[in-house]
Amino acid sequence: MSEFTPKALRTLCRSLPGSVEGYFGHPQLQNSHLYLPSSHLRALDPKAPLVVGMRGAGKTFWWQALFNNLNRAVQAAATAGRVHGRVVARACFGERTGQDDFPTPALFRDLLNTFSPEEIWRTIIGFHLFESQSALGTLSSWSQRAAWTRDNVEPFESELRSANQTLRTAGEFRLLMFDAMDTTSRQWQGDKGLQAILRALLALALEFRNYSAFGLKVFVRQDMLDSQVLAFPDASKLYNNKVELTWPRRELYGLLWQYLGNQAEGETFRNECHSLFQQRWQQAEDGGAWLAPPAMNQDEDLQEKVFIAMAGRWMGHNQRRGKTYSWLPNHLADAHAQTSPRSFLAAVLGAAENTPEDNRLALHFDGIKRGVQKASQIRVAEMAEDYPWVEKVMERLRGEVVPCEFGRLAEKWSSLDILGWVTRPDDDDSNPGRPLPGNLTGSDPKEFREALIQIGIFQSLHDGRINIPDVYRIGFGLGRRGGVRPVR
Amino acid sequence: MTERVDFDTATAAAFSFMRRHLAQLGSRTVLIRNLRGQFRILAEKKNLPQCDIGTLSQEFQARLGAYGGGDPGPIFTRKDLFAADTLFDSPDILELSDPDDPTAPIIRHLDHAIMGADWLRTPGTDNAMEHPHRVVFYGVKGGVGRSTALAGVAWYLAARLGKRVLVVDLDLESPGVGGMLLPMDRIPSFGLIDWLAEDAADNQPERLVQDMTAPSPLSGQRGGMVRVAPAAGNNPDNYLVKLSRAYLSEGRTPQRSFAARLHRLLTDLEAANAPDITLIDSRAGLHDIAAVALTHLDAEGLLFAQDSPQTWAGFGALFTHLRSHRRLAALRERFKMVASMVPAVDSPAYLAKFRENAHTLWSNTLYETDSNGDGQAFNFDIGAEDAPHHPLPIPWLPQLQAGIHPNLEPEDAALLDPLKPLNQWVENLLAPAEG
């Protein structure tokens, strides 16, 4: 026998997370399911202040893993870093923690009416570093704390130095983490805009880099880092040392194994990895997570063999339709050839759900195709969360056919009220949540083109035409050009 | 009707006329084009009233002008002709679908061309016979390293994998692959050209088959074997004279069409040599022999190309023609582009542009429109590795330019490294089918 027991593995695949909430949301955040791509180790380094990743790359995931003190994440951070002592991570901005760790987005926006972004950030930073009996610690509201910070510049600095000393003595490195930056403001430009807020925070991350016992870690999307955000002295020092969260193919499969091996029914899978491929899983020393041997996460030839034992070699009856191992991530990739781990797991889940019970293998290639279509919907929903304007803009292109001239797409926008929608005042309640990037003024459809290219939805061809990779094309309901009509 | 009519508009008008009136004329009606390019219609229905014929003829001539034929005609029925059946049942009739409308009726078309009809003819039934895997190496332009790649693949399959490989040099006008794999003193007595000459004269060509192949020294030590069937045997006499008759195609009997003859030749060679796979070097360009090789031999087609406007224009002409092929669906999925002689400098950018241009070619011609993304249409994204347009790359390397020759030693096998994607692709053909 050279294949996995199909039924058991299929059932296992059907328990994979398959929604936008899955994987990176709280409920699934378990030490045992945590997979650490080797390239992400640098992102956990406490001395790496700027971590960049596309939507779904794992920014919030690492923020939460460190905040929730997941053993293996914290250990990895300690190992990756050049810091003394144990790493203690604090949530300084991001999703709600249930505690008063930082102002809510609404409060943050309110504080901006009185305080500068820098004053607010300093306040939060001081709050997480200073003793509880310090002035900042004893004040009961964020506006009082911010007022203190504003009015006590020199005491703030000396408190900072003594906090660093105290932490050092206690053998602790305090990691101050910032995520979900786009909830701080509803506008991009101006004094209260996201650009200014982010610029102030990044400048502080750079400024505090020289303290030995604490540091900032800011998780942002690449498209947030425009030239205005980086317009502060020595910004290049920060930017050039940024760490990017990417998911090469081998890491996607590594993540899949981690999930399968640690599900409640994962034992059969682990045992068969050993009996079929001599790959023995081991349990972490704390008795928690099962870990696949390194080769299963690094050796693509081995990974392909394992996946063939799950899904067969070809996406059809022979090689004409491609290899399953490369087809799956390939068809989920955006225009920058990046695949989000969530859509990858969702596609495997969909593949299992669409494979008949009596199939010889755990997954059937037709099931994989269906799974990829489903994952495409999930990827579209994921993007809509981060970029509400994308949904509106792409909605207008439904039924169009790519690749095509940009002018054809631009027509769809100009004939409707899209441009007007984009330029509507930012605090209009019909346009809540995320601010629009500053480069979208609505004066020219080319702005959309550039923005869509940057976030990987549009692919600009060398002759100037626009293509849309399948993962978005299918989800947004566009067609693909062909020279003959299909025969059915 | 004052609009100017030319060859192209007349062709379109003739087909559209046929589709409009096919019900009236009968579904087996034949649209005939003579050597001069003029159209006639041989209606199936015997008792079509004379007045209808008159009206239809008038319309036909009005639309086609000089291409609509003169006196008599242009519309005939069975009773106008002496041996109508030979026309109705001619093996040269092409059954053409409308690439823009799959629901449109099939038009039966008889093209009395000097050559070229083999591109669209539906393969004969004997193709269904079991035979070894076949791969045709083809390029619309020559000089792109096609034969070198073929020789390298043959060497790889035999020496590394222990396979039995038959190499057939169909490049009759410019033979090459034989010399890469066989030393001069091993060239067999007869070449393909001799078989074709004997076959034309009905002089038992099968006698030659035993003396048409020779083993290549590049066969390795693993039990593999490369046997080569060169275009010419060791006697160069009369080559050009034989060549001028090689493509003889007597369409009235299916067995005598060039496609059928070539198929028979190949089957004979395969029977005598029992290969695991047959690699066929087709001549370059839009020539009949390439048409047969790509569309009639039940083979995979490797399409060699460089990223140049001439290349894409050539493939464009070929693919546009193939759009009407009735068995397009079975044909196109067996094609795969090869990007040959990829420049060493900036090769990722070169390949990206190649991919886009190849994708444009395929989307304009042979890919199906995908309107709903349900994955059912034969249509691929630019970056889809499995797509026919997505090329297998072969880098430009000095050692490949120097070429493959029969005196290479096993340690020269590093020469094969740049051919890895191609070797792998061909190797995968030999893997057993799944599921």
Image (tube, coloured by chain):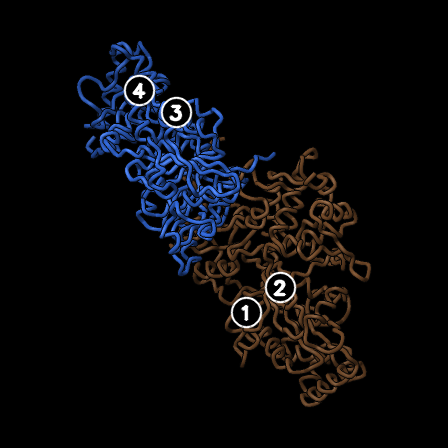
Chain colours: A brown, B blue
Q: Residues within 10 Å of mark 2 (few under 14, many from 20)?
A: some
- Residue corresponding to mark 1: A225
Residue A227 location in percent, x, y?
Answer: 50, 72
Q: What's under tag 1, amino acid-wise?
A: Leu
Q: CA distance from mark 1 to mark 3?
A: 67 Å
Residue B55 location in percent, x, y?
Answer: 25, 18
| Image-based side of A239 in relation to B71, left or right | right
Residue mark closest to the camera, 1 vs 3 = 3
Q: Residue at x 31, y 39 (%)?
A: B175
Dot 3 or dot 4, earlier in sequence: 4
Q: What's under tag 3, amino acid-wise?
A: Arg
Query: In the rendered structure, the residue with mark 2 lies on which chain?
Result: A
Query: In the rendered structure, the residue with mark 1 lies on which chain?
Result: A
- Say which quarter of the image contains residue A50: bottom right
Q: CA distance from mark 3 to mark 2?
A: 58 Å
Residue mark closest to the camera, 4 vs 1 = 4
Q: Secondary structure at mark 4?
A: loop
Residue mark closest to the camera, 1 vs 2 = 2
Q: Do discs 3 and 2 belong to a common subunit?
A: no
- Residue corresponding to mark 2: A39
Q: Residues within 10 Å of mark 1 (few under 14, many from 20)?
A: some
Does B28 sit above or below residue A447?
above
Q: Which of the two residues, A421 or B238, is positioned nearer the viewer here?
A: B238
